[in-house]
Image (cartoon, rainbow, N blue to C red):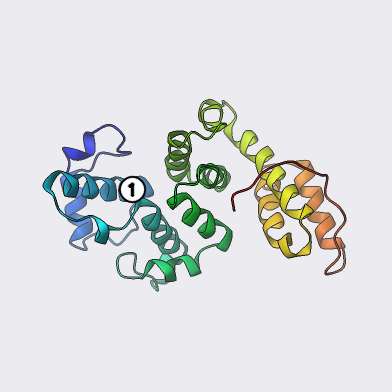
Amino acid sequence: MQRLSRAPGIPKELPESTLSDILNGKRKRLPDWELVASFVMVCHRHAEQTGLPTDALGTVERWQVRWRAARNEHATGSFDLYTTPADEAERRTNRTTARLVRLAGDGDAEAAFRLAIINVLTGDSAAARYWIHAAHRRRHPDAEAFAVNRRPIEFAANLSFDYGQAYEQEGPAKQDIARFYYRLAADHGHPRAAERLRVLRAVPFGKLLPAPVTTERRPG
């Protein structure tokens, strides 16, 4: 496992002692995402090299859904990363993010790119690196620019605001998704996102002030 984890494209080397402790239940703390992603990728690579079936292993995208849900509920001890079904894990995570994970798992470059944006703004740098790599591999037109940007948080916040505008323009049914993206941007000092959040709170239920028209495309 350690040798295979040194191959190009694997996010993190897998020390034998660390893996042994985790797999034998000696570590109670949730492994970081880079380690989990590397373990899944190495398992797939080993299976492919030895002719074993890979279907039962699950995709990296599916394991990220499980890992996110485990991280969200780990403190309560009510979630088991290894035995909870993926569909249940998706239900317990943010619906917008879970939907993007499903789309990205089907090869959608835009969904992978948006997951990178979300993870940058939520402080999950390991997941952000994974998804920007996935978006670049799937030839997203903005992935390379994002990957080398010297101000990734500012870049991501601006895009998150744009996504919020696009959803708000669709009307009340998309208000929660618009608020989700505005909140991500506003939490990093985006003044226009903060203003839109104030507007959404001030407008009576079912009636929204118009958001600026945008040509931004979104997955799905």
In the image shown, does 157 or 74 lie closer to the viewer?
Answer: 157
Q: Position of residue 67 (x, y in %)?
A: 39, 58
Q: Is residue 91 left or right of residue 38?
A: right
In the image shown, does 195 or 161 lie closer to the viewer?
Answer: 161
Quadrant where the N terminus is found in the figure = top left
Q: Is residue 54 left or right of residue 184?
A: left
| Residue at x-position 43% and y-position 35% | 137
Quickly name the residue at label 1: 37
Q: Position of residue 200 (x, y in %)?
A: 81, 59
| Residue at x-position 20% and y-position 51% | 19
Report the amino acid beneath label 1.
Answer: Ala
Task: Kindly give the residue lying farthest to the left in the view shown.
Answer: 50
Q: Quadrant of residue 159?
A: top right
Q: Position of residue 72 (x, y in %)?
A: 47, 63
| Residue at x-position 31% and y-position 47% | 35
Callout 1 crowding tier (Cα within 10 Å): few <14, some 14–19, many ≥20: many
Q: Quadrant of residue 2?
A: top left
In the image shown, does 61 or 81 lie closer to the viewer?
Answer: 61
Depicted 171 relative to depicted 18: above or below: below
In the image shown, does 103 or 80 lie closer to the viewer?
Answer: 103
| Residue at x-position 43% and y-position 67% | 89
Depicted 49 relative to depicted 29: above or below: above
Q: Is residue 107 left or right of residue 10?
A: right
Task: Kindly give the residue lying farthest to the bottom in the view shown.
Answer: 78
Q: Tag 1's secondary structure?
A: helix
